[in-house]
Image (cartoon, helix red, strand yellow):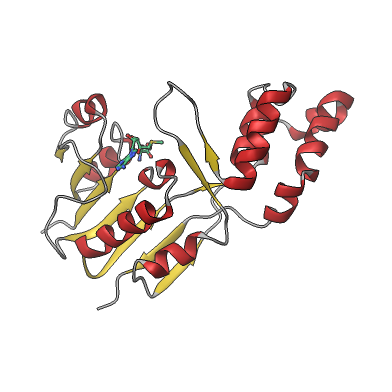
Amino acid sequence: MPARVLDVGGGIGVHAEWLSADGYAVELLDPVPRHVQRAARLAGVSAPLGDARPLPVADASQDAVLLLGSLYHLPDRADRVRVLTEARRALRPGGVIAAATINRHAAVHDAIYLGHYRQERQREAARAAATNGITLSPGRGFPAYLYDPDGGAGEFADAGFPDVERYGLEGGFWLYGDIGDWLEDPERRALLLDAQRSPALAAQARRSVSPSARRGT
Ligand SMILES: C[S@@+](CC[C@H](N)C(=O)[O-])C[C@H]1O[C@@H](n2cnc3c(N)ncnc32)[C@H](O)[C@@H]1O
């Protein structure tokens, strides 16, 4: 029997598609109707509308739970711990949860990449997000929550996971394209160095976060 994978916050099925093609039994949940409509068209993927809080699945029914999106949009810690607690409940003993989080650097790097960092309001908003973790885009859907790299493991522990491992997946510099170009252009070089020297980033300048954990027996 194929392993059962629950793709929570799976969007339009970017991961569900290849997992299903590889032979896994994939169920995708997402709260956005247009996402699940598209995902449901993928071969072998069932895609009900749903939220990570709570998960509409039986205890210990999944071999793996993916949280590659649902932790991006929950500003309240209690909600994030609830998502993780639910994922743990859904996993069979020995099953694996893979969760991605967005690092606090992200808003500043995005602002630079998109050309907004020159505008004071956007720069301050990005820096505020680097400090408090919350970005709000009024009228543009969900808020985003950016993790303090040292905070994620504590949320997993509070949800009852005994063994959490953290992997850095992406640094910030991929956003800049050819970093050599940036460093040679005085104006862009100054922006880059300013961003790197901001106090919030200096304090955070350690790692990106992407915890995975195994449910104990
Ligand atoms: C950035 S997308 C990632 C989609 C997909 N996992 C991927 O990697 O391409 C974030 C997804 O999380 C979903 N989401 C937001 N809040 C959620 C919640 N409370 N529970 C489950 N999913 C949620 C969004 O609808 C969106 O599809």
In the image as oriented, which residue stretches furthest toward the bottom? 217
Residue 95 versus residue 54: which sits nearer the camera? 54
Q: Is residue 121 above or below residue 26?
A: above
Q: Is residue 131 above or below residue 190?
A: below
Image point 41% across, 61% down: which residue? 212
- Look at the image and tell me whether residue 156 can be seen: yes
Q: Is residue 207 left or right of residue 58?
A: right
Residue 130 versus residue 217: which sits nearer the camera? 130
Image point 20% across, 40% down: which residue? 50
Residue 129: x %, y % from top left: 60, 40
Q: In the figure, residue 191 lies in which quadrant?
A: top right
- Look at the image and tell me whether residue 171 can be seen: no
Location of the C terminus by quadrant is bottom left
In the image as oriented, which residue stretches furthest toward the right? 186
Q: Is residue 120 left or right of residue 184?
A: left
Q: Is residue 133 left or right of residue 52?
A: right
Image point 47% across, 49% down: which residue? 101
Q: In the figure, residue 195 lies in which quadrant?
A: top right
Image point 28% across, 46% down: which residue? 8
Residue 170: x %, y % from top left: 57, 46
Residue 67: x %, y % from top left: 34, 50
Tally of marks: 0
Residue 69: x %, y % from top left: 38, 42
Residue 207 versus residue 1: which sits nearer the camera? 207
Ligand 1's image quarter is: top left
Location of the N terminus by quadrant is bottom left
Q: In the figure, residue 9 lies in which quadrant?
A: top left
